[in-house]
């Protein structure tokens, strides 16, 4: 295939070349970066929370007035909930992974440390906490019933036992066994003994402390053997036998409502729904960018179809002449395919630069990570294919121009 | 002549319906996408109280850990401690001022038909209403004396009043909140600032409060803040120790009538911090801030990175659509060179041809704009579906409607400019010869 005549034809319509080239370049830059953003969102959405999400739900209770005895109400509720058929485990819990509100502290390894080693989320649970979350203990032991205390309002004291997540253990002690080691929340106070390690338990904040931070921080959580209520407000996390969540949600709502009239039962919510809310923004971003990508590829492809059709129309006579001089139909098709390939390649060359420029800009303004290397080659191949497919129709039409056209004057 | 050119343009467009449809679609999609994202960007970032946003200032003091700053970027804490907020309120150096925090209380309706429920409220000072100007339906703010007397008074939102009293004038009646009776002094009319700028710490798009009670009453009753709370040194246990602690959990706004008064307030804050440093507090370098509403909204990134990235990418998308349209128009006008040559030979001036073809591009733009507007409506509807809290920022407003149409026409005229110019430079003789 002779390329030179194609190049010289292309150079004669520089403006069209520039227009298509810029379009292809921008398309590559937007598609690569948008796809990268989408993949990051999917990565966050796919992180394990450490919970048995399909079978758990939360519910809260708020009593009225100064005389509401939250301690005994909690005790009564727990006993009642645990006696219900279909309940696997219940723990008092004010916040859970992905609930977007919770308690965080910073952990230190020694009492004379000036700046703490790691941030952590704190979950206050009783001895059924691990079971209710559905997280797996991978080292050490669970809390014993006698270790569970009630946290006094506005208390700043910490219990002496804790269970931490594997990610946090890794951060604090590397590969060493964390069980038996100690951490401090209050460096002026007593150390806290680590008695167990669980595999996962995500922070309440779906993106951890901030989007830009190390993604493993999302799994920095510790469990405290304390029952915590917030004024007259307490919450429970209920885990049902597999598949019995919805039926149990209804029972729990009525039972709690009947057991005490001096309070409000609220926030009955499945963990599946809590997850959907937590990642709503990521899902929205992924869908919106996905829509932009589809529209963009469609517009670019249609633009190529339109331009190519015009060129076919414009060059009818030229094509006829070539056919009359012995060019086969395939020659004509491959002429247009090659022409498109050349144009696309020029555009893509510029596009690679634009892609990295856009990535750099996203990195400096929005803490985006660096674009992995494979996006650009994959994008380039996709746009080459798109260009070839788009031009195929007009090229085929061109190949059907009869050689006789050459002999007509118009 | 204009209508004649319009008709010519219309005919020319009809001659290649698929191509015309493609150009209109490109403009419509580009305009629809970018206007959807720009509307959200515009409404989120727009000034919620333009007539006085430069008079309202948010107070920030840096009482944080000397070893580790509150924020990596060096900003002071976004809220105040109880000690500092109380000191500033008692000094009362601004024309108006209020400390406040987010609370939640059980509402126990007298009407047995209405079940008790938890409502989000705000503990604040009388000045809140004069500062942020919520409209009143009945009654008004409580008096400043109530702030000092820890008055059991309440201002209800229209929704709460609707729920408890069926929307009737309830001034003077009582409402029971967490086993305490409050006397109703005011009922607000519908008040939904697009962005809840007066408390950006606890959700810039969250719904407005159901009720407002005096700050002093709420703290007397030891009502916990249900908003953000951050501490850096471990205080003693209990409520009183909490109030004395370095925990930050209060928002504070001041209103000053003039720049001079603002300067006075600034130096007052400086001297306050200097005083406190003598008492052993504020170990960090002095870092007081008084940002006005718009600065505070920018500082707190009310317009999220996601929304910004979306609008930037959709503007890039619009560029692609325009390049597309330029290319197609160019191809089209070039094909018409025979006709253009003929018209030139028959005496049409370049200026006339220029006008004619620009009008043709304009027609494409106008149709693209109208369809783009419809697409914007669809786009905003999708955004509202995807973001549950965007109800008030994802709606079309009139300036944006006009901007959409204008953008489409300007964009298509820009797109048509080069092809038109090229078309007009056609030498008539050359074109006529080949005919």
Image (cartoon, grey):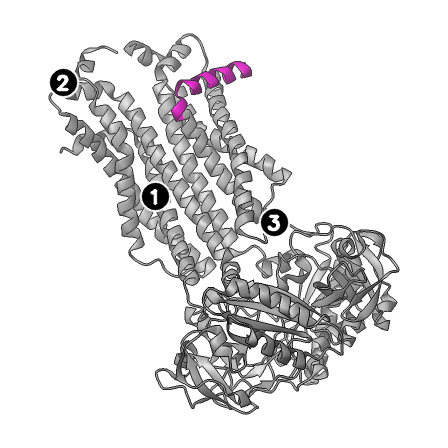
The nearer-to-camera label among 1 and 3 is 3
Image mark 1: chain: A
User: Where B161 falls versus B378 (above or below)?
Assistant: below
Q: Secondary structure at mark 3?
A: loop
Q: CA distance from mark 1 to mark 3?
A: 36 Å
Image mark 3: chain: B
Residue that extends furthest to the top in the rendered view of this protein: B346
The nearer-to-camera label among 3 and 2 is 3
Q: Which residue is mark 1?
A: A25
User: Where A280 falls versus B349 (above or below)?
Assistant: below
Q: Point out residue B49 in the picture as x, y percentages from the top left corner.
A: 71, 52
Q: Quadrant of the N terminus of chain A?
A: top left
Q: Point out residue B135 in the picture as x, y percentages from the top left corner.
A: 78, 51
Q: CA distance from mark 3 to mark 2?
A: 65 Å
Q: Which residue is mark 2?
A: A324
Q: Point out residue B131 in the picture as x, y percentages from the top left corner.
A: 77, 58
- Badge 2 crowding class, 10 Å Cα cut-off, few under 14, some 14 to 19, many 20 or more, is some
Image mark 2: chain: A
Q: What segment carries the magenta color? A: B1-19
Q: Which mark is residue A81?
A: none
Q: Point out residue B161 in the picture as x, y percentages from the top left corner.
A: 78, 55
User: Where A194 falls versus A47 (above or below)?
Assistant: below
User: Where A286 falls versus B29 (above or below)?
Assistant: below
A93, A97: nearer the viewer: A93
Q: Which mark is residue B391?
A: 3
Q: Secondary structure at mark 1?
A: helix
The reply to whether callout 3 and callout 2 are in contact (CB within 8 Å) is: no
């Amino acid at each position: 295939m002779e390329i030179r005549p194609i190049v010289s034809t292309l150079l004669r319509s520089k403006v069209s070349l520039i227009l298509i080239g810029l379009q292809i370049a921008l398309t590559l830059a937007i598609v690569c970066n948008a796809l990268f953003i989408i993949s990051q969102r999917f990565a966050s959405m796919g992180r394990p929370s450490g919970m048995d999400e399909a079978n758990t739900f939360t519910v809260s209770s708020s009593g009225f007035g100064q005389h509401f005895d939250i301690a005994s109400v909690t005790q009564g509720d727990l006993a009642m909930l645990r006696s219900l058929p279909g309940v696997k485990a219940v723990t008092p819990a004010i916040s859970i992974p992905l609930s977007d509100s919770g308690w965080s502290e910073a952990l230190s390894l020694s009492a004379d440390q000036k700046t703490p080693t790691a941030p952590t989320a704190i979950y206050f649970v009783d001895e059924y906490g691990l079971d209710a979350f559905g997280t797996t203990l991978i080292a050490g032991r669970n809390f014993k019933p006698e270790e569970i205390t009630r946290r006094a309002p506005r208390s700043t004291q910490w219990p002496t036992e804790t269970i931490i997540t594997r990610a946090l253990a890794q951060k604090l002690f590397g590969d060493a066994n964390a069980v038996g080691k100690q951490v401090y929340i209050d460096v002026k106070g007593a150390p806290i003994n680590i008695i167990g390690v669980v595999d996962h338990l995500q922070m309440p904040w779906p993106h951890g402390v901030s989007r830009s931070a190390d993604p493993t921080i999302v799994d920095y959580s510790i469990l405290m053997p304390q029952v915590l209520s917030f004024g007259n407000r307490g919450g429970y996390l209920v885990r049902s036998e597999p598949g019995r969540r919805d039926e149990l949600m209804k029972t729990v709502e009525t039972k709690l409502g009947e057991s005490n009239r001096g309070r409000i039962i609220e926030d009955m919510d499945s963990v599946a729904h809590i997850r959907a809310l937590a990642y709503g923004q990521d899902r929205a971003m992924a869908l919106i960018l996905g829509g932009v990508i589809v529209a963009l590829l469609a517009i670019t492809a249609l633009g190529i179809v339109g331009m190519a059709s015009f060129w076919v129309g414009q060059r009818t006579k030229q094509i006829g002449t070539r056919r009359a001089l012995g060019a086969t139909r395939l020659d004509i098709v491959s002429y247009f395919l090659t022409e498109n390939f050349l144009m696309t390649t020029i555009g893509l060359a510029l596009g690679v630069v634009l892609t990295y420029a856009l990535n750099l800009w996203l990195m400096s303004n929005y803490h985006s990570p660096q674009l992995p290397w494979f996006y650009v080659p994959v994008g380039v191949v996709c746009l080459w294919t798109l260009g070839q497919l788009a031009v195929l129709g007009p090229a085929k039409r061109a190949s059907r121009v009869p050689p006789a056209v050459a002999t007509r004057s118009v | 002549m204009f209508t004649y050119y319009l008709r010519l343009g219309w005919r020319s467009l009809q001659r290649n319906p698929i191509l015309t449809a493609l150009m209109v679609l490109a403009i419509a999609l580009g305009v629809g996408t970018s206007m959807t994202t720009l509307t959200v960007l515009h409404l989120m970032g727009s000034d919620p109280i333009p007539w006085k946003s430069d008079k309202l200032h948010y107070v920030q003091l840096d009482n944080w850990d000397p070893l580790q700053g509150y924020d990596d970027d060096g900003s002071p804490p976004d809220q105040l401690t109880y000690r500092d907020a109380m000191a500033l309120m008692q000094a009362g150096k601004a024309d108006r001022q209020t400390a406040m925090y987010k609370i939640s209380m059980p509402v126990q309706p007298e009407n047995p038909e209405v079940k008790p429920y938890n409502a989000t409220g705000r503990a604040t000072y009388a000045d809140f209403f004069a500062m942020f100007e919520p409209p009143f339906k009945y009654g008004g703010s409580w008096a400043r004396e109530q702030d000092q007397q820890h008055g059991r008074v309440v201002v209800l939102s229209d929704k709460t009043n609707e729920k408890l009293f069926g929307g009737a004038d309830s001034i003077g009646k009582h409402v029971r909140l967490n086993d305490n009776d409050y006397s109703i002094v005011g009922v607000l009319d519908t008040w939904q600032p697009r962005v809840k700028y007066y408390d950006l710490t606890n959700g810039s798009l969250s719904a407005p409060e159901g009720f407002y009670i005096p700050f002093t009453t709420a703290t007397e009753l030891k009502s916990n803040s249900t908003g953000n709370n951050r501490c850096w040194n471990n205080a003693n246990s209990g409520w009183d120790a909490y109030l004395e602690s370095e925990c930050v959990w209060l928002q504070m706004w001041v209103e000053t009538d003039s720049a001079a008064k603002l300067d006075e307030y600034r130096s007052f804050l400086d001297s306050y911090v200097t005083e406190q440093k003598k008492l052993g507090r504020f170990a960090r370098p002095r870092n007081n801030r008084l940002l006005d509403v718009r600065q505070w909204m920018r500082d707190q990134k009310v317009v999220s990175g996601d929304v910004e990235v979306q609008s930037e990418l959709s503007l890039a998308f619009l560029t692609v659509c325009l390049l597309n349209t330029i290319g197609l128009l160019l191809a089209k006008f070039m094909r018409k060179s025979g006709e253009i040559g003929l018209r030139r030979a028959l005496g049409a001036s370049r200026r006339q041809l220029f006008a004619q073809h620009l009008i043709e591009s304009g027609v494409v733009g106008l149709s693209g704009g109208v369809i783009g507007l419809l697409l914007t409506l669809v786009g905003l509807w999708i955004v509202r579906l995807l973001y549950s809290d965007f109800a008030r920022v994802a709606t079309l407003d009139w300036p944006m409607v006009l901007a959409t149409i204008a953008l489409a026409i300007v964009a298509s005229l820009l797109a048509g400019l080069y092809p038109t110019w090229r078309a007009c430079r056609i030498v008539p003789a050359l074109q006529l010869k080949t005919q």
